[in-house]
Image (cartoon, grey):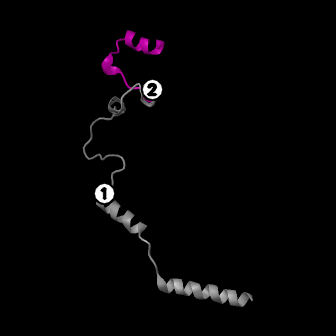
Amino acid sequence: MAHIANHFQNGAGQQDMRPDFYLLEYMWKKDILSTEDYTWAIGYTERPPCDGLVDIGHKTPEMKRKEEKSRELRHNLEKEDRQRRRERDSKRTRR
């Protein structure tokens, strides 16, 4: 607290204050701070406004299509048949 007091004694004001994110999280988890107030407080940023930035986790339509495509299960029946034949043949040669 002495550190904080020193800032105010040197002319810092409320406009110079920044949130203590660890304290905010603690207070929210202990139900001392409402979810609404917590959400508002953790939204603090010192980053200047910048056009073209998107939210964290934003995905373009192209990114979504690529994800969907990668989730599709593809079967190459010819390749699977060759693999089964190889496995069958290798079992026969081991005997």
What residue is drawn where x is 36% and y is 50%?
Answer: 57
Residue 7 higher or lower than 91, as above or below: above
Q: Nearer the viewer, residue 64 or 17?
A: 64
**Label 2 crowd (10 A; few <14 / some 14-19 / many >=20):** few
Residue 13 point in image, percent of width and height: 32, 15
Real-space CA distance between mark 2 and mark 1, rounded to the nearest whole angstrom:
35 Å
**Magenta highlight range:** 1-21
Q: Label 1 is placed on what type of residue?
A: Thr
Going by the image, does 71 lie left or right of 49?
right
Q: Earlier in the sequence, mark 2 or mark 1?
A: 2
Q: Nearer the viewer, residue 94 or 55?
A: 94
Helix, strand or loop for disc 1: loop
Going by the image, does 16 lie left or right of 79?
left
What residue is drawn where x is 38% and y is 12%?
Answer: 8
Residue 16 higher or lower than 34, as above or below: above
Q: Which corner quadrant of the image does residue 84 belong to?
A: bottom right
Helix, strand or loop for disc 2: helix
Q: Are marks 2 and 1 in contact (CB under 8 Å)?
A: no
Residue annotated with mark 1: 60
The answer to if 4 sits in the magenta stretch is yes
**Label 1 crowd (10 A; few <14 / some 14-19 / many >=20):** few
Q: Residue furthest top?
A: 9
Residue 23 is labelled as: 2
Residue 7 higher or lower than 22, as above or below: above
Q: Nearer the viewer, mark 2 or mark 1?
A: 2
Q: Residue furthest front?
A: 31
Residue 14 point in image, percent of width and height: 32, 18
Residue 91 point in image, percent of width and height: 68, 86
Q: Label 2 is placed on what type of residue?
A: Leu
